[in-house]
Image (spheres, rainbow, N blue to C red):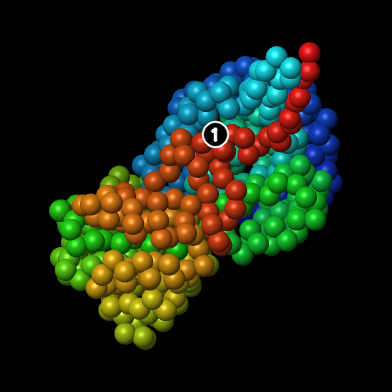
Amino acid sequence: MDIINPATEEVLAQVQTDTAATLQQKYLELRHAQPHWAAAGLKLRTAILETFYQLLEQEKEALATILTSEVGKPLQQSRNEVTGARTRIRWMLNNAETYLSDEWMTLDTGIREKIVYEPLGVICNISAWNYPYLVGVNVIVPALLAGNAVLYKPSEYATLTGTAITKLLHAAGVPPEVFQMAAGARQTGELLLDMPFDGYFFTGSYKTGKHIWERVSAKMVPCQLELGGKDPLYVADDVADIAAVAAATADGAFYNNGQSCCAVERIYVHQAVYDAYVEAFVQEVKSWKMGPPTENGIYIGPLTRKEQLVTLENQVQEALQNGAVLQCGGKRAAGKGYFFEPTVLTNVTNNMLVMQEESFGPIIGIMKVNSDEEAVQLMQDTEYGLTASVYAADEKRAAVILRQLNTGTAYWNCCDRVSAAVPWSGRKHSGMGSTLSHIGLRAFTKPRAWHLRG
């Protein structure tokens, strides 16, 4: 399998992909080793993953360089991702004992009752390319802490990063037979779905997530799906600093080239502040520098996947043909690499592709609304349910709006952020199950009830 640099279209490396035979061998090693890993105890597992946490900092520059080379995100954003992954790991390490230890429920004289959180066993993690460290540690770290063995398949677009993560975990002390990596694309993933894992954890598109769920549902094992979104944002008429809001929300839409499941993908603005907001938003976007992601000051790098260029072109053309106005961008950049100019469309309607289908790129539609009620109606018009954002001076007003939206995350005066302390979950086509928080730690366990008399 060729690993392509999306900024130059050059082949970075060739990687040997797994076969049915090599995957079966890795699975058998994991199955044999998992009980020993579970029996080693939470204290030892925590200490090993503490070392992994430290190694991420020590190797950050090398890891960021590899990530940028195969995914294309600007180098500083790659550094930020490694740092963000460490922040999440820190929370998990600090809270693992609290949420993975036995939990006594009643201590009456006659009978005592407790919950024991046992590992699922051997799990399969099919991961994503857009934030391989962040979405990776969401699964890998709590799964290992809980005593599971893991077969980890990074995206084919982040294979070198997946290899680096695997090596670092082994260097930290995770036994190789407890954490194995599978290399390959769709064919490798299909082979994994045929194997008898004790749980499947996937991050990626709705289409692939639905396919995985349908393939493994008969096994009746946990299957968590962290999928995409068409995340709406509303700017109310009482915002105090329009320029600041425009800058913050532009970043929420275009950070990592818009290749985030929780990126702002639709913006609705109250008519009273619409013109001022659009002017400030476009000015912010035009100030960004696009180019080779290894250069200082670059904010927009190449898209990771060449195929996404066609998706963005189609969304732009369909919008323009139906009356949208192009404020900036709108086309591929000339030359080598998968570059697409940051694009802002106004005068859009909610039935346009750019307002309905996940873009996963540097493109945004901004729509004028007359009231909070109209904003709610339009924000509800989606098959997804990941996040929703409201910028408003009044928290109560924002809460009224957000409570009407069926999303796993609600933002007031912020957007496009994730915290390890609270669950990350999707509704409708944005997935099922939760990672992060105590829910995400326990997602990798099966509770056993104990009733003890005497």
Taking 214 as reference, is 80 left or right?
Answer: left
**Residue type at mark 1?**
His
Query: Based on the displayed image, in which of its 4 quarters is residue 314 positioned?
Result: bottom left
- Between 236 and 35, the residue placed more toward the observer is 236
Secondary structure under badge 1? Answer: helix
Taking 205 as reference, is 454 left or right?
Answer: right
Q: Is residue 123 visible?
A: yes
- Between 87 and 94, the residue placed more toward the observer is 94
Location of the N terminus (image quadrant)? bottom right
- Between 452 and 53, the residue placed more toward the observer is 452
Taking 244 as reference, is 250 left or right?
Answer: right
- Judging by the rendered image, the residue that carries numbered circle 1 is 438
The spot of residue 240 in percent (x, y) is 15, 53
Query: Based on the displayed image, in which of its 4 quarters is residue 197 positioned?
Result: top right
The spot of residue 268 in percent (x, y) is 30, 67
- The residue drawn where x is 75% and y is 35% is 121
Where is 431 relative to 34, above or below?
A: below
